[in-house]
Image: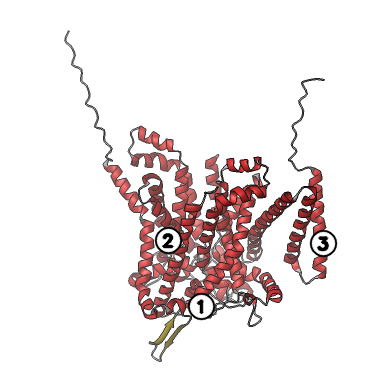
Amino acid sequence: MSLNTLPTPQKPWKTTNRQRLSTSLLIVAAALISLVIIGSTGLNGKLGFLSTLFITSSSLIFIQQWRLRDVAAAKDSLLSSFALLGMTLTVIPIISIVSTVAIKGYKGIHIGMFFNDMSLNSVNDPIKQGGLLHALVGTIIMVGGALIISFPIGVLTALYLTEIRGKLSRPIKFLVQAMSGVPSIVAGLFILSSLVYPITKSLSGMMGSLALSILMIPTIARTSEEMLRLIPHELREAGVALGGTQWRTVAGVVLPAAKSGLVTAVILGMARIIGETAPLLLVSGGGDSVNLNLTSGAMGSLPYYIWKAFLTGGTEDAFARAWGGLLVLLAFIFILFGSARFISGRKVS
Amino acid sequence: MSIQEIVIPLPRELTTKPRRSDRIFRGVVTVGGMASLVILGLIALFLSVKGIHILREEKFDFVFGSKWEVITDDSGTIAESTFGIGAMLVGTLLCSLIAIAVGVPIAVLSALYLTFYAKGLVKNVLVSIVDLMAAFPSLLYGFWGFFIFMSSAEYWAKLLNKYFGFIPFFKVPAPIFERSPLIAGFILAIMIIPIVTSISREIFDQTPLDRIQAAYALGASKLAMIRAVVIPFGRGGVIGGAMLGLGRAMGETVAVYTVLNIVYQINWQVLFGAGGNVASLILLKFGEAGPYEVDALMAAGLILFMLTLSVNALADLLINSFGGKGR
């Protein structure tokens, strides 16, 4: 008997192939049973099949676990089926939304749409005429304007919560939370009541920017607060120990260290507001031609363009136009979100 | 050899008083930090300034009444007007309660899945998808709901009506199943699921590992562990997350406007295609409203603002005082 041969480690808790096989056989059996149920009762369609499949397969697995082990294990298997069901129900809509927009929007995309506006066309014109240049330009200008307003305010709020930590930290934190819950239409109404009616008396891109920044500030403040909290405390202490004042420490050490985090905050804020519709319907005017002037004249935007094409148009072309606009909007959100993930992910590694 | 005089430097003055630059910095940051307070205050102020005279005129009828009429005479001046958002408040509550009832269980289950079942790459991808979904604009949900989701939801609504029609909730006065509060509630549920999921997931993630391992060591199955450790620990946080979702659902404008058939009547029958909510009322009436009616819309906005603010306050209270505590 040699002592050098170590026994291979045993992992009795791992799922064996036999168990996997029996589970998949059960699911196949459940699929067959649910096909029979579908065939013999009033339920029909994909949704009907999937729901019966879920009920039959989870009850089959329940019975199997009960017979092999005990009631506790059977209940445990039930929870895992339900957790999987919840996840599936969460993911199905996003898959459906993205695929719908991709399939329907594909027809509405043509290269000319990025060079033309709608000043000479109506939404019901053939899809090859006109485009969304004005909407694209308007969205970029208004989101940029909102960014210029909300970035300093958001970062200052985050700095107050992480660096000053005054007596008001707790209430401010709550107010930022509450502000993120302000309905978007209320933001629009606020701009109308405070600026448009008493002062400017006209709708413009500037008003849109201001309304959007109300929705953007909380996102930027909360994300940058989280990012500033990730900065190790030793960095701040090192800055102060080298004789820096708090101002020098924050400006020279903390903010540069949190740079990528702040960029992430900005990107997430932009993703939050780029598709906001309700306030823009109230305050931006929604013009049909390219308008580069933020302070005067109606300014179009992507959400407004989509809204108008869906609600005032009735033809196939109008719908194709709207779905095309949604595809462009979705592409923007994907790009913004992907770059936020990329930047914040790189920082961790 | 003369003794060189040794110059001893004076000790530096030690003080805890901040320098001038620091005082300026602290001042600027504090002022910036107050921005959220100022903005929320201004919103309340300006909406009240515009809307308060309507509230004063209508008194409690503005909240409980359900008539929204403006009668103008020939010259265009307003002869008579009644404003009441009762029907729309009922619609708001109905849609958002459906959203909570449908969305929160699904969200909690998927948060449990993400925390305790999913592993590695699958987990990362799913977490990204849920976060991305939270960033989708309501416009997208609205039109998807109208063009794609409506037909299948209508089928289920008919099924519900057929087998559960004896329950007053599921009765319909006329066989119109399209654009009903139930479908709007479903769309709102889909919209709040990612928010509630990510909050619940964060709370579940904070469950102390030693308690989890203690439960496993005592021979608990996953279900027993979750029931004994995770749920008591995360209950308050999950309820708070659900309240945040409720606030979001109450203030939703575009998705509800697109999906719901807005009819100005109190409608409790969730399957019948009529209803509304306060936010979509504002959007609907704004286009044709004269200055006087706009003031009434401002008052409606004020009510909506106060409603969402109080729901959010409750959510914050719950998350902070009960979140992350347990046995």
- Can you say which quadrant of the picture contains the N terminus of chain B? top left
Instruction: Confirm or deny contact between disc 1 and disc 3 (CB under 8 A).
Output: no
Both labels 1 and 3 in a single chain: no
Q: Is residue B248 left or right of residue B12?
A: right
**Nearer to us in this view, A110 or A301:** A301
Q: Which label was assigned to residue B87?
A: 1
In percent of the image, x 60 and y 66: which residue is there? B187
Quarter residue B242 falls in? bottom right
Query: Where is B72 relative to A1, above or below?
Result: below
Q: Label 3, secondary structure: give it.
A: helix
Q: Position of residue B15 (x, y in %)?
A: 26, 35
* Subunit bearing disc 2: A
Residue at the spot of label 2: A214
The amino acid type of the residue labelled 2 equals Ile
Q: Which label was assigned to residue A50?
A: none
Residue at the far left in the pictured view: B2
The amino acid type of the residue labelled 3 equals Ile
Residue at the spot of label 3: A33
